[in-house]
């Protein structure tokens, strides 16, 4: 698939703030929707994206970095 260059203020801000990774923490229903969103972040912004179920996220070891965007749903 050949993708067109897409420009948006959101994608521009990800570059401006030097975001290297995105972590999305969502509850069960929204988790599935954000799995799709993670595909688009990786495809359009070329940023590695992980999606976690919020009930399980609390057991994960957290690495807080300035270059990681955490989105809590």
Image: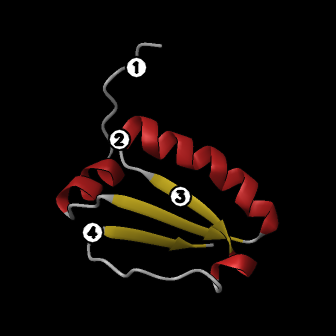
Q: Which mark is residue 67?
A: 4
**Circles 2 and 3: CB atoms closer than 8 Å:** no
- Label located before the other in sequence (4 or 3): 3
Alpha carbons under labels 4 and 3: distance apart: 14 Å
Distance of label 2 from label 3 (alpha carbons): 13 Å
CA distance for labels 4 and 1: 26 Å
Out of 41 and 61, give the one closest to the viewer: 61
Q: Measured along the vertical axis of the image, is residue 2 above or below residue 53? A: above
Question: According to the image, label 1 marks what residue?
Answer: 3
Q: Is residue 6 above or below residue 39?
A: above
Tag in front: 2 or 1: 2
Crowding at label 2, few (<14), some or many (≥20) Cα neighbours within 10 Å? few
- Residue 22: image location, x then y, percent: 43, 61
Q: Position of residue 23 (x, y in %)?
A: 49, 65
Residue 38 in the image: x percent, y percent?
54, 49
**Res 46 label:** 2
Q: Residue at position x 52%, y 82% from top? A: 61
Say whether residue 48 is left or right of residue 72: left
Secondary element at tag 2: loop
CA neighbours of label 4 inside 10 A, class few (<14), some (14 to 19), many (20+): few
The numbered dot on residue 50 is: 3
Q: Earlier in the sequence, mark 2 or mark 1?
A: 1
Residue 73: x and y in percent read: 63, 72
Q: What is the spatial separation of the Cα atoms under label 2 and label 1, in whole angstroms?
A: 12 Å
SS at mark 1?
loop
Q: Is residue 73 left or right of residue 32?
A: left
């Amino acid at each position: 698939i050949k993708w067109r260059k897409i420009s948006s203020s959101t994608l521009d801000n990800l570059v401006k703030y030097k975001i290297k990774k995105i972590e999305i923490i969502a509850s069960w229903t929204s988790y599935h929707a954000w799995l799709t969103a993670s595909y688009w972040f990786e495809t359009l912004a070329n940023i590695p994206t992980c999606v976690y179920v919020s009930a399980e996220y609390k057991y994960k070891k957290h690495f807080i970095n300035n270059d990681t965007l955490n989105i809590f749903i």
